[in-house]
Image (spheres, rainbow, N blue to C red):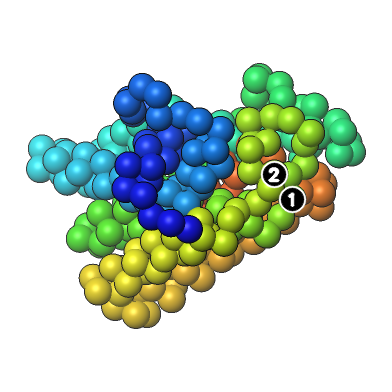
Amino acid sequence: MTFRPREEAATFAVAVQFLTRLPVPAGAYTPGRLRAAVRYYPLVGILVGGAAALVMLAAAGPFTPLIAILLSCAATLLLTGAFHEDGLADTFDGIGGAGRARALEIMRDSRIGTYGALALPIVLALKIAALAALPPPTVPIALIAAHGLSRLSAVLVVATSRYARDDGTGKFTADGVAAGSLLVALGTGALIAAAIGWNIGGTGVLFALAGLGIGHGAARLVFERRLGGYTGDCLGAVQQLSEVGIYLGLLAWA
């Protein structure tokens, strides 16, 4: 992979455009850049987690820790347009369908069903409860690390599974992840893990990664057997359960 600064900046802008509601320069999008943008998903996660950490720190002065955490979570929902949360709800609705074809059909429905309506508040509540129970100095680290590593978790699904539809918003990932892009994403994840270790020690890293692995595996158990692969919604579910897994892993360590 030849590094071309302007091209990589445009590719990063497309990753930001796809995963968040942040404005990016007009004309950055091309289908090729969208496919390549997966390498910057963990970096976009750091951006989202950093924004959440800043909101939490700003709110921690005038408000209680719980309110500060609620505001930080609200900030991430606004920043991403609840993109991943929507995928989580659609995925859980889909697994309630009888058979693969019916599950995929249900996941296309914009209306939320019983399974999604249950999964979404439970996952959000787990995030908030886990963060509120962590030692306050650990929360900003947890937010940045979890948002970055959970998006790497979604990239790993693209790299190791197959796309389950003939079309859809995630169709551009059907060819998997190029080796160079996977190395960039993994390298970003390694830097995040090193940063956790620098701040809270190696044991904390191990617990965070264990939580990540459990969340990643649990998400794939939910959809891979039923669908024979993943969809764009499933990547949102992976991100959400991996993020929660990291928070719970850090809480178990703390």
Residue in the picture at 35% in, 58% down: 145
Q: Residue at image x 41%, y 65%?
A: 187
Q: Dot 2 corresponds to which residue? A: 174
Residue 11 location (% of width, % of height): 42, 41
Q: Which of the 4 image quadrants contains residue 141?
A: bottom left
Horizontal placement of 208 versus 57: left or right? right
| Crowd class of label 1 (few under 14; some 14 to 19; many from 20; radius 10 Å) | some
- Nearer mark to the viewer, of 1 and 2: 2
Label 1: state its secondary structure.
loop
Residue at x-position 28% and y-position 68% = 195
What's the residue type where badge 2 is placed?
Ala
- Examine the rendered structure and indicate whether residue 213 appears above or below residue 168: below
- The kind of residue tagged 1 is Arg
Q: Which residue is mark 1?
A: 162
Q: Position of residue 75 (x, y in %)?
A: 31, 33
Is the C-beta separation of discs 1 and 2 under 8 Å? yes
Visible residue check, residue 198: yes
Q: Position of residue 189 (x, y in %)?
A: 42, 63
Q: Looking at the picture, how far across and down is residue 236, in whole percent?
A: 57, 41
Does residue 153 appear left or right of residue 100 in this picture?
A: left
Q: Earlier in the sequence, mark 1 or mark 2?
A: 1
Please report the residue visible at 39 percent of the width from the left and 61 percent of the height from the top.
188
Q: Nearer the viewer, residue 172 or 92?
A: 172
